[in-house]
Amino acid sequence: MGGRLALVADDAERAAIEQYTGNVYVEGTDAAKERTWLTESGEPSYTKFYDNQPNGGTEENCLVLYEGWFHDSACEWKAGYWATKVLCEM
Ligand SMILES: [Ca+2]
């Protein structure tokens, strides 16, 4: 299956996604440099982290949106039971 994760670019887009419940994986990673969040094209990611997030260090390099706030999360969980949703660009 193809497709790519949705890029959340600003507060308006974040608000639009907030309606979805559960954990929503969106585009962005700090795999290259810890705590430097980049889009797939290498631009700085818009982020709005929840209190005390990100907290996963090098174990958690993907972005999850949960109830309107960003959290860092393990990338391999995107396909696992924990990921209730993966939002893709249409
Ligand atoms: Ca990380």
Image (cartoon, rainbow, N blue to C red):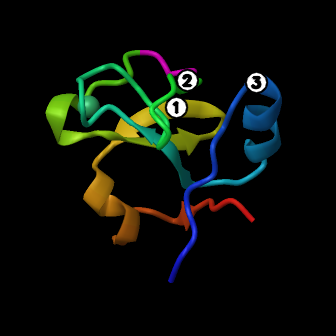
Q: Percent x, y for residue 50?
A: 50, 22
- Please say whether residue 63 is one of the residues in the magenta stretch: no
How crowded pointer 1 is (Cα within 10 Å; few <14, some 14-19, many 20+) is rated as: many
The answer to whether residue 86 is left or right of residue 30 is right
User: Tag 1: residue type?
Assistant: Phe
The amino acid sitting under disc 2 is Thr
State whether label 3 is within 8 Å of ligand 1: no
In-image side of 79 versus 34 (left or right): right
Query: Does the Cβ of the disc 2 residue fall within 8 Å of ligand 1?
Result: no
Question: Where does the image place residue 75, in percent across and percent down from the top left?
Answer: 31, 53
Report whether 13 appears left or right of 6.
right
Start-end of magenta stretch: 47-51
Mark 3 and mark 2: span between their CA atoms?
9 Å
Crowd around label 3: few <14 · some 14–19 · many ≥20 (10 Å)? few
Q: In this view, does 12 lie above or below 8?
A: above
Disc 1 is placed on an element classified as: strand
Q: Residue at x 19, y 28 (%)?
A: 57
Residue under the point 38% across and 22% down: 53
**Which numbered disc covers residue 11?**
3
Q: Nearer the viewer, residue 16 or 44?
A: 44
Magenta region's main secondary structure? loop
Q: Name the image quarter holding residue 90.
A: bottom right
Q: How crowded is mark 2: few (under 14 residues within 10 Å), some or many (20 or more)?
A: some
* Whether label 2 touches label 1, CB < 8 Å: yes
Q: Name the residue under label 1.
A: 70
Most foreground residue, 90 or 47: 90
Q: Earlier in the sequence, mark 2 or mark 1?
A: 2
